[in-house]
Amino acid sequence: MKDKNGNIDCENVVNCRNCTRCNNSTGCNNSTRCYNSTGCDNSTWCNNSAYCLFCDGLVLEKYCVFNKQVTKKEFDAVRQRVFDKLGWTHPKQLTPQDISWLKKNVKQFNKKVLDAVIANSILPDKPKKV
C-alpha cells in the first residue's frame, strides 16, 4: 500500500520518501528494504545503519558512501554535492550522464555497489518529488 509520501509497503517509517518495503526507519529517501535505519538515501538492504548514500547490504554501519565509511563531514559534503547536481533522483532513474557525473565527482564511487543498488531498488509508481 502506498502512503502520502510515496512509500510502498513500508511499516513504521517517519519522514521517508519514495521508499519500498522499508520498516522502522526514519528520514530515508528512494531506498528499498532498509530496516531500522536512519538517513539512508538511494540505498538497498541497509539494516540498523545510519546515513548511507548509494549503499547496498550494510549492517550496523554509519556514514557510508558507496559502502565506504567516511567522516560525518565528508558524508554531509558528498550528500550535498550529489543532491545539488542530481536532485532526489531514484536509483532506477539515473541516466548514463548521471552515473558518469557520480564517477567523476564522488571519490568513493564504486560501480559494483551502484549496480547492486540499481538492481535491488524498486521504483514506486509515480515517485514523489522529495
Image (cartoon, rainbow, N blue to C red):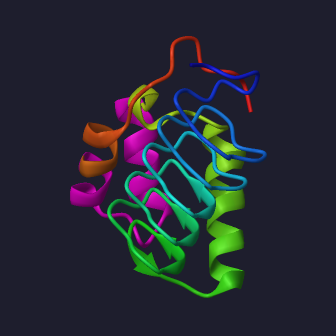
Pick the quarter of the image with the N terminus.
Answer: top right
Return the x and y of residue 110 as percentages of the image width and height: 30, 63
Q: Is residue 53 above or below residue 41?
A: below
Q: Is the magenta stretch mostly helix, strand or loop?
A: helix
Side of 16 relative to 86 (left or right): right
Q: Where 64 sits versus 30, above or below?
A: below
Quarter of the image with the C terminus in it: top right
100 drawn magenta: yes
Q: Which of 96 and 10 is in front in this view?
A: 10
Q: Residue at x 45, y 56 (%)?
A: 54
Q: Nearer the viewer, residue 16 or 13?
A: 13
Point out the stretch of residues depicted in magenta.
Answer: 95-115
Residue 12 in the figure: left or right of residue 20: right
The percent position of residue 82, horizontal first and vertical second, equals: 61, 52
Residue sitting at the far bottom: 71
Task: Please identify the residue farthest to the top as the structure is shown.
Answer: 126
